[in-house]
Image (spheres, rainbow, N blue to C red):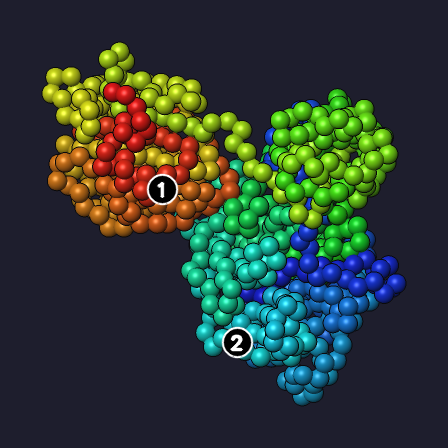
Amino acid sequence: MTCRISVFTVLAFSLLAALVTCAAVAEGTEPTDELAGPWQLFIDDYLIAAKQHVQRRYHPFRKHPANPLIVVDQPWEDNVVAACTVLPGEDGSGFRMYYYCWTPEKDPSRSYLCYATSKDGLKWDKPVLGLHEWAGDGTKSNNILPNGCGAVMRTPWSADPDRRYHGVGGRYHARASADGIHWRPLSEKSIVSGGDTSHFYWDPHTKKFRCNVKVNFNVRGLRRRCVGFSETTDLTSFPPLRLIMAPDDFDDRWCKPGTVARTHLYACPVFAYESMYVGLLQIYRAEDEEGYFHGPLWLEMVSSRDGMHFLREEGDRPPVLDIGKFRTFDHGMVIAPPPLVVGDEIWLYYTGYDDLHDFLPFHSCIGLAKLRKDGFASLDADEAPGEVLTKKFADVGRTLQVNYNARGGWLRVEVLDADNAVIPGYGREDCEPLTGDAVRQVVTWSGNKTLPTDRGAVRFRFIMDHIRLYSFMAGAKARVIDEQIAPPLQVLFTFEGNTEARSDMLWEDGSQALRNLGTCRLDHKKRDPAFGKRSLVVGSRWRPWNRVEIEGTRNLGRHFTLAAMVKCTKNTHARLFSAYRGNFPTNTSELIFDFDPRGRIVSGMRLFCKGIPVESDALTFDDGKYHHLAVVFDDGAVTFYLDGKPAGQRWLPGGEPVRLARNLLIGEDAEMGTDEQLHGNVDDVLVLGRALTAQDIATLSEKGATVFFGLKE
């Protein structure tokens, strides 16, 4: 990437802001600069206990017919203008934008941060600020902001009046301002270490400053742009970044076999929206021979309940903002800072480029796209009436409001108690059907608008016919009570018992079978267990491709533990658990947990998960004795354990559950490839769909699984 693009991308992603409609501005209504609130969205299944005859649809932003709204038209602007942050006016009316521009070649600065204002959000002015003397004409008659910030955060809660605004400028320096125009430095050094693309924002949910910054990782064997995360209460100092988003197999579905073309996640501006978080993930398909420089870039939506663990869209992942048609100003790339809520709409100011990434010289303009409020996704009932049952909600308020479009159909709502019984007077026949189209409609039952707040936790059942349901609001303090719908995966083989020593010892989730795919055997003749009376012997000099399969282990979920007692007869690099076919690359639908007792190929232990390898601290345990090896995946936080002691923590993307293309194997890969055959004994093989604690792992290692789970031998 050229220097100019690097500078541009540092500033090109901004912060959350909120705003009112143009009509409201004209009427003098004060805008809000916070998108967070109590509404519950159906972007994902987090709120849902059950649903039938409905499907989730995603809805793209609609580009404004007056686009482009801001173009290169000043002498100090050259080729590129890019939106960074849009906020309400300082006096509470109108709009203001912080945007970035390239400068003519003769200008040594090469780039500036500039300022624009608008009364209606459509017609923009570039006011003379008189703050910077431009070398082109030697005057201050321009809209350049010296020492300005691309990421601008309104922080009126600050006790210091000179810090009503916080911001992050070039080279990741923190700054503060009293008016959003005149800035002073807060940090002498960079506040975060990462790539040249970033997004900083103030999170009203956690009361912290957060950032998403470009990081590079090897995914599926190729170097990729990914998304890192950090948060802090002090803008001048962020902890090290952790990986939270990376491309997966589906992102690369367009790549031809044998090429280095690949998908990158270029950046992801995130904003707190109502009761959750939404991100505008930049999908960049690098089509050039090096797989890194040239290709289109568009936006997809991601969602989260905590701002760290993100879910991708279901199905084909349609763009939330796509590139334009050929020869339009935005047909090469589109990027955008977080949007604003304007009345019953979401307004997204975006930058469109007329050519592919790094095809210079490209040109850009700034446009506007709109979406219905809460309209990122809906649950739709089309041909047959559908139902959606929510999880339990505590602390509900006095009324229930819904955002829906009946499209010729109707919506009714039932209220159920904690035992799933319909509360008298709140059944479907009592509910007055909702028709038409409304963003915030109060639900009534036989004329009664009040929810039963004296019944404790309640559920809502939405009965729908030809309707789109976007969101609902059950009070400012209403909160979902997360429920474990089904028992987690539980698999344990201790190789004990009087009947079948290869039986799964944990049965709450059903029994998983252990299938022999080689000459693995129990140690009947020469017994050598870690605990109890038996172990499993893996590996054979006559058959090197030797393993067993644990059926029913394709869905590990967002939290899991893999562990076993292992004794090696050959202290070489070996697979312990594998769902890998055995041919490069390791896909995001595959998994490897392997080890190297001598620490030569792997630094002790390694987990290959979501296409990314992470290793333990440097370890050696080549003494020919039993050792307890474990790895815990806690929604992206990976912790290794050797003999019950922590052996390093690493980070992988969370949010999306780990789903595998095949069942887990013990001892080798699924297909013949290079030789990573495990030779030796394994005992207390555990696959658990929850993240065990450090104390749990220590007990497993010291006393064995039989004692830990309270089983009878």
| Residue 613 vertical placement versus 659 (above, below) | below
Which residue occupies the extreme right position in the image? 27
| Residue 296 vertical placement versus 86 (above, below) | above
Residue 497's x, y, as percent?
25, 16
**Which residue lies under the disc numbered 2?**
186
Question: Disc 2 on helix, strand or loop?
Answer: loop
Q: Residues within 10 Å of mark 2 (few under 14, many from 20)?
A: some
Please name the residue shown 81% across and 24% down the image.
429
Question: Disc 1 on helix, strand or loop?
Answer: loop
Please name the residue shown 85% across and 65% down the image.
28
Q: Quadrant of residue 632?
A: top left
Please name the residue shown 55% across and 61% down the image.
208
Q: Is residue 252 visible?
A: no
- State which quarter of the image contains the C terminus: top left
Please name the residue shown 51% across and 39% down the image.
656
Q: Quadrant of residue 24?
A: bottom right
Q: Quadrant of residue 339?
A: bottom right
Q: Residues within 10 Å of mark 1 (few under 14, many from 20)?
A: few
- Three-letter code for the amino acid on which mark 1 is drawn: Thr
Of the image marks 2 and 1, the number of the one nearer the N terminus: 2
Residue 340's x, y, as percent?
72, 57
The disc at residue 693 is 1
Which residue occupies the extreme bottom position in the image? 138
Residue 410's x, y, as percent?
82, 29
| Residue 58 vertical placement versus 229 (above, below) | above
Q: Nearer the viewer, residue 692 or 179?
A: 692
